Amino acid sequence: MVFELSEHNAVAYLEQRGWLTLPGGRLTVLSGGISNVVLAVETVFGPVVLKQSRQQLRTADPWFSDLDRLFREVAACRLLHSILGSPHVPVVYFLDRQAYLCGMEKMRGACVTWKEYMLAGWASVAAARVAGSMLGRLHEATAALLRHSELPDGPAELAGKRVFEQLRVQPYYRRVCERRPEVASLVAPIIESTLQTTEALCHGDYSPKNLLVVGLAPSEPVDERFVFADPAGGRATFCLVDHEVAHWGDPAMDVGFCLTHLVLKSIRHAPDSSRFVVLGDSFLSGYSAQVAFRDPQELIRRGLAHLGVCILARIDGTSKIEYLPEEPRREVARRIGRRLLREAPGTWSQARDLIESELQAL
């Protein structure tokens, strides 16, 4: 039986391994989404996030995934840290394979997510551009690794798409086919295409909830392309977390997945939605500036198909968003998703016009 981490036994677990700075070190329960137990504790490494996989996810609909997806997360985290560096990706300190548990660097400060700030009304084009730039750097660097067969440590953990199917294809794409049969024939080829594509590392969960806003000291050396002003006007950047869905796959899925959350925030804030719709312009501008392995406009075009599916999935799939409880707003999201799939816009400009026309109903 696998040891199950909790706030009641985490300190003892670390003490037995000599990893606590002091007996009874401070411990905090963090939000681990729906798929993991996540705790923060003081250790010999400093503040550490403990993360352990759970087989059954915390959703109303039954949803299961392999415990060893944690090994995928650790491999991806180490790879992405080698590409993006600190503070954009945490350092992994240890991995307990028997317990499906790892310890990684805890980012300093409050670590508010980009999602929380946007829900509170913060619409920063600079932050959106940085989010796009980081994703573009991630895709460009990993596409080069695949192209030159220079695979990093842990290629076995990142190969295969079983976890991607468990955590994205089944609960999002196939669930949309079941619950929105009017678009099933349009979604099916998107599923087939993304499962057959291997062009770069697909993060699979590149969204505002996984981009932590991290404050920077005035003179802290960070690539200025990845710096923006936080809501208080301070110097900040993003730290990308939650890599358990990462795999060698279709980078266009990441583009559409992140755009989905920007569009849904625009629906949340309607009628004051224009400030959030334009974040898509900045996000894609930052992304395109970093990508050369393929025409970025082609990746964006493909990403718009994923955008249509994922909008519908967040309304009617297994993992529904919590911040659009009003049915009129949910129906606008459905109309946008259906139109994106049916009309298949070839550019973001065309997609944005479509989205804005539907937002007028709110």
Image (cartoon, rainbow, N blue to C red):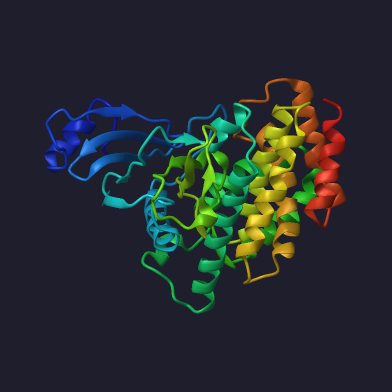
- Give the x, y percent position of residue 147: 54, 77
Note whether residue 295 is visible: yes
Query: What residue lies at 49% left-to-right and 40% top-to-bottom?
Result: 64
- Residue furthest bottom in the image: 148
Above or below 204: residue 327: above
Q: Quadrant of residue 170?
A: top right
Q: Is residue 219 left or right of residue 310?
A: left
Q: Where residue 80 sits: x, y (%)?
A: 44, 59
- The answer to whether 73 is drawn above or below residue 333 in the figure is below
Tell me the quadrant of the picture where the N terminus can be found. Answer: top left
Q: Residue furthest front?
A: 219
* Residue 181 seen in this snapshot: no
Q: Is residue 135 above or below residue 124?
A: below
Quarter of the picture containing the C terminus is top right
The picture places residue 290, in percent across and down from the top left corner, at 60, 64
* Image position of 307 (left or right of 150): right
In percent of width and height, residue 86 lies at 38, 54
Nearer-the-camera pick, 318 or 18 = 18
Q: How many marks?
A: 0
Q: Nearer the viewer, residue 244 or 222?
A: 222
**Residue occupying image coordinates x 48% and y 43%:** 236
